[in-house]
Image (cartoon, rainbow, N blue to C red):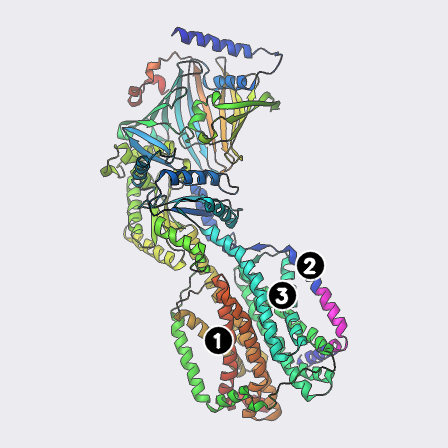
């Protein structure tokens, strides 16, 4: 616990330091990606949001998903627990997914199927799999460790009104990845990615992430509306975060198999 | 009107004979102008484009592809090994090959279906597994064996991705619409050719066949058209012993082709498969000029003065040349009335080319005759006595044996009618390749091992959201699927029912007895969501649309035959009447269905257009001769030729396909041509001599020689095509020979017999005219 507190303080200091306006020189590419990783996936000790997801095909056909996502960090930049509870479409209401995310090894995932009153563990070896049929992969939802790639700061440029670092990331073990290159535009003040372009193995642009709306919630910059567009199929997914709350003081023990069958109110709000 | 035409024609011919060099230069300049357009040629070999983009079947197919994220063009690679493909070595090669394919330009990488890219949902030790089947290469035989059992256990994969005996697996490669299937297939062959393992590779699929055919088509055209032309030159020389005649004949053909193609290419019209055959047609029609040379050879001997010989020749043949060309033009132009654009283009191109031939007959040909060097008269045939020539004897025999000859003709027609009733209108692009060709072999192999390459979609539309997840809907869909799978033409069928059953079984600890559709709609929806968390989105999207309103029953057919698709769809229709899917309407789509509709619209459309043209030509003939009786007589060779050929097609069980439908229209150009020459010249002769029998024998012997020469010329030229590498060209060759010989036979044998049979009825008016 003590260790967690220290890490926590370090994290806050990191964010505070980053907010200082004047800097002598740009940080290294590794540092940028590390900070961005923390800003994107580790803000606050815990976090909860109501997620509205729209899956839209090239022809404009739409599928919706509404769920509550709760996250609890066990360690800054390290282990995390996720709980995802489905509200809509109505026929999948009460379905829930529990994820224990680790560093350096496959996550543990459990799924609850209410119609069959069944909890099943799911092996999560394929992190490129689509997240509930969307254009986001599991990796996009729970983060990709920056150490898995080699980063290079290409330039700094404005994207819209925002100053951004443009970082190129090449996977260290390309055989295991579905992308060959990733270009990230990282906001210089919030460290959140504003845009990410993934290239497929052939080197063609495959998926493009854009942060559409960003809000400051309880002092944490949060992307409240994001898009992932498949540049090849024309399919895209919009994700809107509502009712975002940080530091709810949720116990890690809440994130248990038991919660899947009878989720406590804190996890479904 | 006629008088005005005669004076115009005489003036034109006279002027051309007087200014041959001017005519040559003018024609040359115009030919250069048209020829300059040729390099701008745009070709379109996709048979799909023979139906306009706005046609309902294309629009519906595009819609279905949109709903389910499907791709119309898929190349299939089969990897086959007698000892099974589940060995670490072969699996490693498959992984390497797949990885290379994903990098090919033009390949829709995200939707490539292969062992390394398909996720399998399974359960092991109570843990749901969702990962690519070939996540990593098995280390040893035992591990590979385990993988094999896992794949064969999954009904979504067995029989489709891996053959049920595990001796074959496939890579399904969707390609962009703009990509060239042959180019990708060639790259694939380069890759697979380097492999030295025990396995064999087969490459099939509609885009490969189509684009290979497109490339081959022009290659074979470029090889065989000149070859046929050369053979014809040789034969022409043997007939007339004069390079002038050979050159003049070929010049007329080439000019017609260059002007026709040049005009259409210059107008920016793409050349489809059909129009690409028009040079062959124009070459055939241009032999009309043989009649002129034939007559000139006779006249030159009778008349001393060359210019007078030209004048007399042209006066004698003007009417038949004009009538036959005009009728041919009208016949082909009337093909343009139909709705199918490439057929229209083809009809108009040939019509325009024929017009050019007509024009050349009265300009370039007399000019060339005038230029033929003096002092070297065209050699004279030794057969001076017409009545003793073999054609004359045939004419005499036909007149003498008129009744038996006519009876034999009637019997032939009746037998052919039986053959026609057996005709099967069918189109199958794969069969355009020879049986031993790589494409045919690969197609057979895939049909045997992996359910075939022709995709048929049966789209069940539940009319409102979440209709598909209703258990009764899924159960009815599954029932339909199981019954379809029993049809021999069906290789494999997959539907969303399979997905639900698979997930349900896996969730129930993989107990085979639980491979069923659960009874609650919520359970179905949740199992589908679970599947979408485990598989690639396309694996579900291909089978059910976004609002869960429509389900796609994907059926792989072992055959590209349109008739088999029709038979299957008829069975499906009856099946659905007996046991409907509650609340749903089922409609077919997919390339196999498209092929069937194409068959109906293009082939039947072509056939209808042809029949309409024949009727049109019949009335034109009546107008030409201002006599219904002579119209009937001159129409008979066309009818005889067409009926006999279609009858033979029915008897030998050759499918009535596109090459046949196109080629049969050629009889419009030839049979009519022969008949008009015969009838016109007979009428002239009869008006002069009033001797029926003598006129018939004279016509059979003199203009008849032009007809037989013409026919023989072409039969020999196109016999070369019998050795082509693509069956449509072999068909072209065989058809040319058949049309030539039958038209000539019908003209030289049946016209004398018929005219002799009804002399009073026919010649009454001719006598009055005098």
> Image height check: is A268 above or below B24?
above
Please state which of residues B184 and B701 is positioned toward the viewer in this rendering. B184
Task: Identify the secondary structure beneath mark 2.
Answer: loop
The answer to which of marks 1 and 2 sits earlier in the sequence is 2
The residue that appears at 49% across and 67% down in the rendered structure is B722
| Residue placed under numbered mark 2 in the picture | B36
Instruction: Give the label, 1 or 3, closer to the camera.
Output: 3
Q: How far apart are marks 3 and 2 (CA)?
A: 13 Å
The answer to which of marks 1 and 3 sits earlier in the sequence is 3
The answer to which of marks 3 and 2 sits earlier in the sequence is 2
| Residue B622 seen in the figure | no
User: Which residues, given as a range, are shown in magenta?
Assistant: B15-30
Q: Mark 3 lies on which chain?
A: B
Q: Quadrant of residue A98?
A: top left
Please state which of residues B58 and B227 is positioned toward the viewer in this rendering. B227
Residue B650 lies, in percent from the top left, at 40, 69
Instruction: Give the position of the N terminus of chain B as an image quadrant.
Output: bottom right
Q: Which chain carries label 2?
A: B
Please state which of residues A46 and B513 is positioned toward the viewer in this rendering. B513
Q: Residue B257's mark?
A: 3
| Same chain letter for marks 3 and 2 | yes
Q: Residue B131's mark?
A: none
Task: Identify the secondary structure beneath mark 3.
Answer: helix
| Residue placed under numbered mark 1 in the picture | B641
Task: Identify the secondary structure beneath mark 1.
Answer: helix
Instruction: Give the label, 1 or 2, closer to the camera.
Output: 2
> Image height check: is A149 above or below B693?
above
Q: Residue furthest front?
A: B196
Compared across the picture, whether B169 is left or right of B19 comes to left
């Amino acid at each position: 616990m003590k260790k967690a507190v220290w890490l926590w303080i370090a994290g806050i200091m990191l964010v505070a330091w980053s907010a200082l306006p004047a800097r002598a020189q740009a940080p290294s590419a590794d540092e940028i990606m590390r900070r961005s990783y923390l800003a994107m996936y580790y803000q606050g000790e815990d976090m909860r949001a109501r997620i509205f997801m729209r899956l839209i095909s090239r022809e404009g056909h739409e599928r919706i998903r509404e769920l509550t996502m709760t996250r609890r960090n066990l360690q800054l930049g390290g282990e995390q627990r996720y709980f995802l509870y489905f509200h809509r479409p109505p026929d999948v209401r009460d379905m829930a997914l529990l994820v224990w995310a680790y560093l350096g090894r496959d996550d543990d995932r459990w799924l609850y199927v209410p119609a069959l009153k069944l909890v099943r563990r799911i092996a999560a070896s394929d992190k490129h799999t689509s997240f509930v049929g969307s254009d986001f992969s599991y990796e996009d939802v729970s983060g990709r460790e920056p150490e898995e790639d080699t980063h290079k700061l290409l330039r700094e440029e404005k994207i819209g009104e925002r100053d951004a670092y443009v970082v190129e990331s090449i996977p260290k073990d390309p055989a295991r990845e579905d992308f060959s290159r990733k270009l990230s535009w990282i906001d210089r003040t919030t460290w959140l990615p504003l845009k990410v372009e993934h290239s497929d193995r052939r080197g063609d642009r495959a998926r493009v992430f854009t942060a559409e709306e960003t809000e400051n919630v309880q002092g944490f910059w949060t992307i409240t509306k994001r898009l992932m567009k498949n540049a090849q199929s024309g399919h895209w997914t919009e994700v809107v975060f509502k009712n975002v709350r940080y530091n709810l003081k949720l116990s890690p023990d809440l994130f248990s198999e038991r919660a899947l069958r009878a989720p406590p109110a804190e996890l479904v709000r | 009107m006629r008088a005005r035409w005669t004076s115009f024609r005489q003036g034109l011919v006279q002027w051309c004979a007087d200014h041959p060099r001017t005519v040559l230069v003018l024609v040359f300049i115009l030919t250069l102008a048209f020829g300059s357009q040729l390099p701008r040629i745009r070709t379109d070999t996709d048979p799909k484009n023979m139906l306009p983009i706005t046609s309902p079947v294309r629009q519906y197919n595009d819609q279905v592809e949109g709903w389910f994220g499907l791709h119309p063009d898929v190349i299939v690679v089969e990897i086959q090994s007698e000892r099974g493909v589940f060995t670490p070595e072969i699996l490693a090669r498959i992984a390497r090959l797949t990885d290379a394919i994903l990098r090919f330009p033009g390949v829709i990488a995200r939707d490539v279906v292969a062992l390394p890219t398909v996720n399998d949902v399974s359960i092991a030790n109570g843990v749901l597994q969702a990962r690519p089947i070939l996540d990593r290469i098995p280390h040893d035989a035992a591990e590979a064996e385990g993988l094999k059992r896992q794949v064969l256990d999954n009904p979504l994969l067995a029989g489709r991705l891996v053959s049920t005996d595990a001796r074959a697996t496939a890579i399904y490669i969707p390609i962009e619409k703009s990509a060239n299937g042959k180019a990708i297939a060639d790259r694939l062959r380069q890759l697979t050719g380097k492999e030295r393992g025990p396995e064999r590779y087969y490459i099939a699929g509609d885009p490969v066949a189509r684009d290979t055919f497109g490339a081959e088509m022009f290659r074979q055209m470029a090889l065989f058209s000149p070859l046929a032309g050369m053979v014809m030159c040789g034969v022409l020389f043997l007939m007339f012993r004069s390079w002038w005649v050979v050159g003049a004949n070929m010049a007329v053909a080439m000019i017609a082709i260059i002007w026709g193609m040049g005009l259409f290419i210059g107008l920016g019209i793409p050349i489809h498969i059909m129009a690409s055959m028009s040079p062959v047609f124009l070459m055939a029609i241009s032999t009309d000029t043989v009649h002129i040379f034939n007559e000139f050879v006779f006249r030159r001997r009778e008349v001393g003065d060359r210019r007078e010989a030209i004048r007399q020749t042209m006066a004698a043949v003007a009417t038949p040349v004009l009538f036959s060309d005009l009728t041919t033009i009208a016949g082909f132009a009337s093909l343009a009335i139909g709705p199918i654009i490439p057929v229209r283009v083809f009809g108009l191109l040939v019509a325009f080319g024929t017009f050019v031939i007509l024009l050349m007959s009265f300009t370039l040909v007399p000019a060339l005759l005038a230029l033929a060097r003096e002092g070297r008269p065209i050699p004279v045939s030794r057969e001076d006595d017409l009545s003793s020539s073999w054609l004359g004897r045939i004419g005499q025999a036909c007149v003498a044996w008129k009744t038996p000859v006519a009876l034999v003709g009637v019997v032939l027609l009746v037998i052919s009618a039986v053959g026609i009733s057996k005709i099967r209108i069918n189109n199958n692009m794969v069969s355009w390749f020879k049986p031993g060709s790589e494409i045919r072999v690969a197609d057979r192999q895939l049909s045997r091992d992996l359910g075939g390459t022709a995709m048929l979609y049966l789209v069940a539309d539940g009319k409102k959201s979440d209709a598909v997840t209703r258990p009764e809907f899924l159960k009815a869909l599954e029932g339909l699927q199981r019954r379809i799978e029993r049809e021999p033409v069906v290789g494999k069928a997959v539907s969303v029912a399979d997905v639900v059953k698979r997930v349900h079984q896996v969730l129930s600890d993989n107990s085979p007895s639980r491979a069923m559709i659960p009874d609650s709609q919520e359970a179905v929806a949740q199992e589908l969501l679970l599947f979408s968390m485990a598989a690639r989105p396309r694996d579900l999207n291909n089978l059910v649309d976004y609002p869960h309103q429509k389900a796609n029953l994907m059926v792989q057919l072992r055959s590209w035959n349109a008739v088999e698709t029709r038979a299957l769809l008829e069975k499906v229709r009856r099946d659905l009447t007996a046991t409907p899917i509650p609340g749903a309407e089922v409609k077919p789509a997919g390339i196999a269905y498209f092929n069937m509709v194409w068959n109906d619209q293009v082939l039947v459309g072509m056939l209808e257009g042809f029949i309409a043209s024949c009727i049109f030509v019949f009335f034109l003939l009546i107008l030409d001769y201002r006599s219904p009786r002579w119209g009937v007589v001159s129409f008979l060779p066309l009818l005889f030729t067409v009926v006999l050929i279609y009858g033979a097609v029915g008897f030998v069980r050759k499918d009535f396909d596109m090459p046949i439908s196109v080629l049969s229209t050629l009889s419009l150009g030839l049979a009519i041509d022969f008949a008009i020459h015969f009838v016109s010249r007979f009428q002239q002769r009869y008006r002069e001599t009033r001797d029926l029998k003598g006129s018939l024998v004279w016509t059979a012997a003199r203009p008849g020689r032009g007809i037989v020469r013409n026919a023989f010329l072409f039969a020999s030229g196109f016999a070369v095509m019998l050795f082509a590498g693509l069956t449509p060209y072999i068909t072209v060759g065989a058809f040319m020979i058949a049309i030539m010989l039958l038209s000539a036979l019908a003209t030289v044998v049946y016209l004398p017999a018929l005219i002799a049979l009804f002399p009073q009825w026919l010649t009454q008016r001719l006598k009055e005219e005098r």
